């Protein structure tokens, strides 16, 4: 497989743009105030994380991908790779890039060129339909290989000039539309990722042209993707540049009702193999932490992400076998082996500063940690010793938890939700804790947008003998309901595991909002749902041929559930609600029996559309 690109082709222009942008002093923070958690495509997470994560490593050796999952101590949700692209046959016909992954447990992400690199072809001829038959072949190739639910990065990084398809916004857009139309006719479950390079690049340097002209339109795009590396610019620019920063692309995706993907992200070397200076910042564990925090904070909007690990001249950033970046490798492993927040929980770090939803606004007199930053996972928290200082957190959800330090010199704070009566919070401890702890949890609120104001008082615990401060590390926000769709298959938390003999809906899929549910007609078939929360609701069809099922929570006594109805319903309905459980991780096992409602006259099946958890 040829290398992804040579960065030297864009050095001069990006360097000039970067210096100009950095001189303007882009503001820190800046998460969009647009509503999060739209209904765009979000890849299932078999690893149980709040977002799907994976990796690119060179080649098609599936054992290497499995071993990467073992290194990070969390299974991969996806594999990102590329077929060869010199000729049409390299990527539209069967080949090792496809056959190697048939039957593997990953969602596949393929970088696919709109035209080959070494044959007589053009974007204009693509747009005119000259290659429609080739794209029909491509669709059949993937579906025949069992890869019909893959993600296609069609003509990725089109705003650069390092690929043949880069630079012509109109021709690229029209070709993209033509390809999607042809492929969807034979492979309707493939997802198309419109995937830019983060930063003003020398193919389509004008952001307005990129977004307004090169974007093919919402009906042709399933995901909006951004490739981003720790090169050329600092983290603040990469995050907050008003046109090309990650927050700007997140806002763009939200405006279009799409999730945001990061098909390639990673570190970048400081020197190439020949000793020439490279634009990267090298072995930076802080960058790994920053990216991870961005994914955590915006988990509801992340379609998927994949670290691009390459030992070649283009990056030299491998985290594993070989390890080019040892400090970052250790940081990545530590973060990804730890449990990610359950689906439905987002984190607002002290660094997410601003007045928008999902941010925290500090009054004057808050200081940054210095020698004790290592107490928290992202090496950043803030403190104040001034009575009356406030931290205002704006969030969307149904519950907020504030995390900070318990220390001998902590004083009492108050928390007021939505302008209500302030509640005292006492973070005093006779001995300082070793890390960040939960200081406060709000009551359950109506799902929606809320404001919490934390205020330092001049009052203290009677046991306190001196000092005065409070701290803010982060806030965690729980959404009222998390949905586990039938497509979120696996054995992780937030997933459903089906036994044999479940089938996919066909002609009646339109009964449910996501056009997907499953059914079984075999007694003893099970659906096992692992979830984090305090209550589960199972949704499916009420039909004349439904039979009785049972539901058992955490190995307890099975409870009968009867989805029979004399007349079939028009859509998915709640079939079961668990009792209120202790907050935490639970398992529900749904089992089909061979018993039926006395009014039933024949047929036998049960269905699973989704489960809601709160």
Image (cartoon, rainbow, N blue to C red):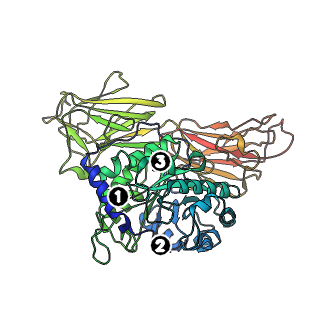
Specify few, some or many for label 3: CA neighbours under 10 Å numbering under 14, 14-19, or 20 or more: some
Q: Earlier in the sequence, mark 2 or mark 1?
A: 2
| Residue that numbered label 1 is attached to | 288
Q: With 117 as the anchor, is 357 left or right in this view?
A: left
Instruction: Measuring from the top left, give residue 461's x and y in whole percent.
Output: 20, 31
Q: Report the Cα–Cα distance between label 3 and label 2.
A: 31 Å
Residue lying at the far right of the rendered structure: 601
Figure quadrant of residue 545: top right
Please tell me which of labels 3 and 2 falls first in the chain: 2
Q: Residue at x 42, y 43 (%)?
A: 346
Q: Is residue 234 visible?
A: no
In-front residue for pair 32/56: 32
Mark 3 or mark 1: whose residue is earlier in sequence: 3
Q: Is residue 125 above or below residue 292?
A: below
The image quarter containing residue 309 is: bottom left
Q: Which of 606 and 220 lies nearest the eye of the viewer?
A: 220
Residue beneath disc 3: 211
Can you say whether 359 is above or below 370 in the image?
Answer: above
């Amino acid at each position: 497989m040829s290398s992804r690109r040579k960065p030297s082709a864009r050095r001069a222009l990006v360097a000039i743009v970067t210096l100009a942008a950095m001189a303007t002093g882009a503001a820190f923070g800046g998460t969009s105030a647009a509503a999060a958690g739209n209904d765009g495509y979000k890849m299932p997470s078999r690893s149980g994380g709040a977002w799907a994560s994976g990796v690119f490593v060179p080649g098609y050796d599936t054992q290497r991908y499995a071993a990467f999952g073992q290194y990070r101590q969390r299974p991969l949700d996806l594999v990102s790779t590329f077929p060869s692209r010199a000729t049409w046959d390299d990527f539209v016909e069967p080949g090792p890039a496809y056959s190697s992954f048939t039957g593997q447990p990953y969602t596949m992400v393929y970088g696919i060129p709109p035209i080959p690199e070494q044959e007589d072809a053009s974007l204009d001829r693509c747009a005119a339909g000259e290659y429609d038959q080739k794209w029909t072949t491509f669709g059949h190739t993937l579906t025949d290989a069992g890869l019909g639910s893959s993600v296609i990065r069609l003509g990725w990084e089109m705003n650069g000039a390092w690929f043949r398809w880069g630079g012509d916004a109109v021709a690229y857009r029209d070709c993209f539309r033509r390809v999607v139309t042809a492929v969807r006719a034979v492979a309707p479950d493939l997802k198309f990722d419109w995937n830019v390079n983060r930063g003003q690049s020398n193919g389509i340097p004008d952001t307005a042209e990129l977004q307004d002209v090169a974007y093919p339109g919402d009906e042709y795009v399933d995901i909006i993707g951004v490739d981003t590396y720790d090169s050329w610019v600092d983290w603040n620019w990469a995050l907050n540049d008003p046109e090309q920063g990650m927050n700007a692309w997140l806002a763009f995706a939200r405006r279009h009702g799409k999730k945001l993907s990061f098909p390639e992200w990673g570190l970048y070397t400081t020197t190439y193999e020949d000793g020439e200076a490279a634009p990267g910042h090298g072995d930076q564990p802080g960058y790994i932490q920053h990216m991870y925090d961005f994914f955590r904070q915006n988990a509801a909007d992340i379609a998927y992400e994949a670290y691009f690990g390459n030992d070649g001249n283009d990056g030299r950033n491998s985290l594993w076998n070989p390890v080019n970046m040892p400090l970052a490798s250790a940081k990545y492993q530590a973060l990804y082996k730890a449990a990610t927040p359950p689906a439905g929980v987002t984190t607002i770090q002290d660094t997410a500063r601003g007045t928008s939803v999902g941010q925290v606004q500090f009054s004057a007199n808050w200081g940054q940690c210095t020698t004790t930053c290592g107490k928290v996972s992202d090496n950043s928290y803030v403190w104040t010793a001034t009575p009356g200082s406030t931290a205002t957190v704006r969030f969307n959800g149904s519950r907020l938890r504030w995390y900070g330090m318990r220390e001998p010199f902590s004083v009492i704070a108050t928390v007021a939700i939505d302008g209500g009566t302030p509640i005292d919070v006492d973070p005093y401890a006779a001995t300082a804790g070793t890390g960040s702890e939960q200081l406060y949890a709000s009551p359950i609120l109506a799902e929606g947008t809320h404001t919490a104001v934390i205020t330092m008082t001049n009052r203290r615990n009677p046991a306190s003998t001196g000092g005065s401060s409070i701290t803010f590390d982060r806030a965690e926000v729980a959404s009222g309901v998390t949905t586990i769709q039938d497509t979120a298959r696996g054995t992780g938390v937030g997933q459903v595991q089906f036994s044999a003999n479940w089938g996919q809906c066909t002609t009646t899929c339109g009964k449910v909002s996501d056009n997907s549910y499953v059914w079984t007609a075999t007694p003893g078939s099970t659906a096992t749902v692992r979830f984090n929360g305090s209550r589960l609701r199972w949704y499916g069809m009420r039909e004349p041929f439904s039979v009785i099922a049972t539901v058992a929570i955490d190995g307890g006594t099975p409870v009968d559930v009867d989805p029979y109805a004399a007349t079939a319903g028009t859509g998915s309905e709640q079939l079961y609600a668990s009792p209120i459980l202790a907050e935490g991780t639970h398992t529900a096992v749904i089992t089909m029996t061979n018993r039926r409602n006395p009014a039933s006259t024949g047929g036998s099946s049960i269905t699973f559309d989704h489960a809601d958890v709160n």
